[in-house]
Image (cartoon, rainbow, N blue to C red):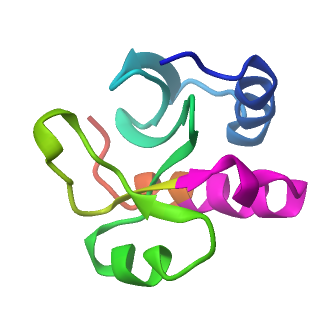
Amino acid sequence: MAVDDHLVAQVRELVGGGPDVDERRMFGSLIFMVGGNMACGVRGDGLLVRVGRDATDAALGKPHVTPFEMGGGRRPAGWVVVGTDGLADEKDLRAWVERGVAYARTLPPK
């Protein structure tokens, strides 16, 4: 799955740099890691965001948000995909990226 280079640049800027920030290719996405934990990622169909198990249902109630589906139809809890229509406003993109980064920071560093 191809990723949108412009969206990658925006997310990279929002995640920020630092010794605990890393980028890796996985799940057909460019994943942004914080403290060794996945926070969010850019996919061809939008933004993959780690919201945590307890927040998954609420996130899925938002416009343009769908479950993250891995190969074989598996849907890991705690992850959603925000479609590109839900990222058109910079404020919305910032909120989703910050949400993923904030959740990753609650986890023990790896």
Instruction: Please name the residue shown 16% across and 45% down the image.
Output: 73
Depth check, front residue: 98 or 6 = 6
Measured as percent of width and height from the top left, residue 38 is found at 38, 39
Up/down of 46 relative to 2, above or below: below
Most frequent secondary structure within the magenta stretch: helix
Instruction: Please name the residue shown 38% across and 78% down the image.
Output: 55
Measured as percent of width and height from the top left, residue 46 is found at 60, 42
Left or right: 10, with 38 as reference point:
right
Depth check, front residue: 31 or 28 = 28
Up/down of 1 relative to 17, above or below: above
**Is 95 inside the magenta-drawn segment?**
yes
Q: Quadrant of the C terminus?
A: top left
Measured as percent of width and height from the top left, residue 64 is found at 61, 65
**Is 59 inside the magenta-drawn segment?**
no
Left or right: 19, with 80 as reference point:
right
Identify the magenta region.
82-99
Count of residue discs: 0
The quarter of the picture where residue 107 lies is bottom left
The quarter of the picture where residue 53 lies is bottom left
Measured as percent of width and height from the top left, residue 29 is found at 46, 25
Left or right: 74, with 108 as reference point:
left
Up/down of 101 relative to 19, above or below: below
Instruction: Please name the residue shown 71% across and 36% down the image.
Output: 11
